[in-house]
Amino acid sequence: MCLTLRLPRSGFPEESPREAEAAMRFGTPYDEIYVDDAFVPEKEARLSVLANAVSYGTGTFEGVRALWNPGQQELYLLEAGAHYVRMGRSARILGLDLPHGPGHLVGVTAELLRRNGVRGDAYVRPLLLQAGEQLAVRMHDSGTRLYIAATPMPGDYIDRRGVRCAVSTWRRAVDTTVPGRAKVTGGYVGPSLAKSEAIRNGFDEAIMLTADGYVAEATTSNILLRTGRDWATPSPADDILDGITRRLVARLLGELAGAAVTERRVHRSELYACDEALLCGTAALVAPVVEVDGRRVGDGRPGEATLAVQSALDAISRRRDPRHPEWTTPVYGGA
Ligand SMILES: Cc1ncc(COP(=O)(O)O)c(C=O)c1O
């Protein structure tokens, strides 16, 4: 197969108009941001260039989806409580304090979206950052600041019609270096390198291996794969972020396809031999993997179970489907 890529001077393939448009729209945050118990104009929510988090990557963040239902004129947060529980755990790993519990922060998030009048799909970005400006490299005695911002997310983060992946030369950091189960800001250097490498080489997304060569996850999403009737996904002991969407997808695979998903070590060669694979995450939602390292996954078309889960999760997230209302929180009706 001959791949023709348009390579501008940067060495990266040019973005498709669809990607370029999405990048522009995702980039503009809504006007108000929550900063330490107050709602302030976005322009005032700044961090010093001297803040420890800027130099040392010492902070934790989350991503929470808000999905709009135009028929109901309602916005729903997807598993917002679970994201703040994970953020509390990430903070504990870093030795930082998340100042409020999940219930309070879900309420703040809903208020933020209401104050910004958000009536469309959005992405909420909570950040707990080491804001002190000491030179010392350390976690203690440096104040933190909690931000919650939101940006519109009107299109796909990665192409939900099918993703072409490459196994990256960049590996996941091990738990004893930068713990992957904590969503640490500095932990995203490796995934950023991996993503750019994949794009530069003409792929859509990178799959990262553990330091000892087992499949871990994609740059910002988890991976599940099916061989015959068996679905597998790497375990949190393989240096992945224990994804919240992954749990929802495993549940839906059980309900829709009668499948049980096993958490276990996954070999790289399984990526090449499997019959179906998908990526899932808060930003990606559910995306079929159609190719890995130039080899077709299954027959090269999105898997049936993947498509069923993709559309079920989309409908459940907007309460167009009455199943699992416990996964969503209404933003306006709950006010
Ligand atoms: C490294 C990484 N893995 C997996 C995921 C998927 O996790 P979740 O489904 O909780 O968003 C994310 C996204 O947050 C991520 O950044």
Image: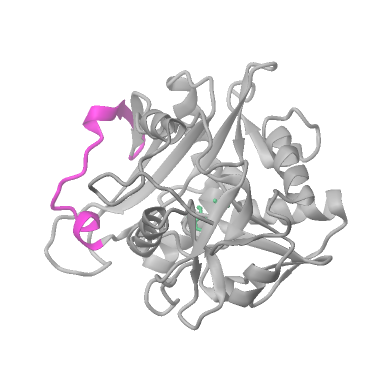
Residue 242 vs 123, above or below: the answer is below
Query: In the picture, residue 174 is in which quadrant?
Result: bottom left
Q: Is residue 335 left or right of residue 226?
A: left
Q: Nearer the viewer, residue 34 or 290?
A: 290
Residue drawn 64% across the image and 21% down it: 333
Q: Residue at x 69, y 16 (%)?
A: 71
Residue 131, position in %: x, y? 23, 52
Residue located farthest toward the right when viewing the structure as drawn: 258
Q: Name the residue: 59% across, 75% down.
A: 268
In this view of the protein, which residue sits in the foreground, 333 or 327? 327
In the image, 121: left or right of 7? Answer: right
As drawn, the residue found furthest toward the bottom would be 212
Residue 75 is situated, as x and y percent measured from the top left of the image, at: 60, 25
- Look at the image and say whether residue 37 sits in the magenta stretch: yes
* Left or right position of 36 against 309: left
Residue at left 52%, top 31%?
155
- Residue 16 part of the magenta segment: no
Whole-percent x, y for residue 111 in the image: 48, 27
Where the N terminus falls, by quadrant?
Answer: bottom right
Q: Dividing the picture into quarters, in which one does residue 19 lie?
A: top left
Magenta residues, start to end: 36-56
How many badges with numbers are in the image? 0
Q: Is residue 89 above or below residue 329?
A: below
Position of the C terminus, as image quadrant, is top right
Q: From the viewer's perspective, is 231 left or right of 192?
A: right
Frontmost residue, 313 versus 24? 24
Picture coordinates of residue 96, whole percent (x, y): 36, 61
Question: What colouring style does the render use?
Answer: one colour
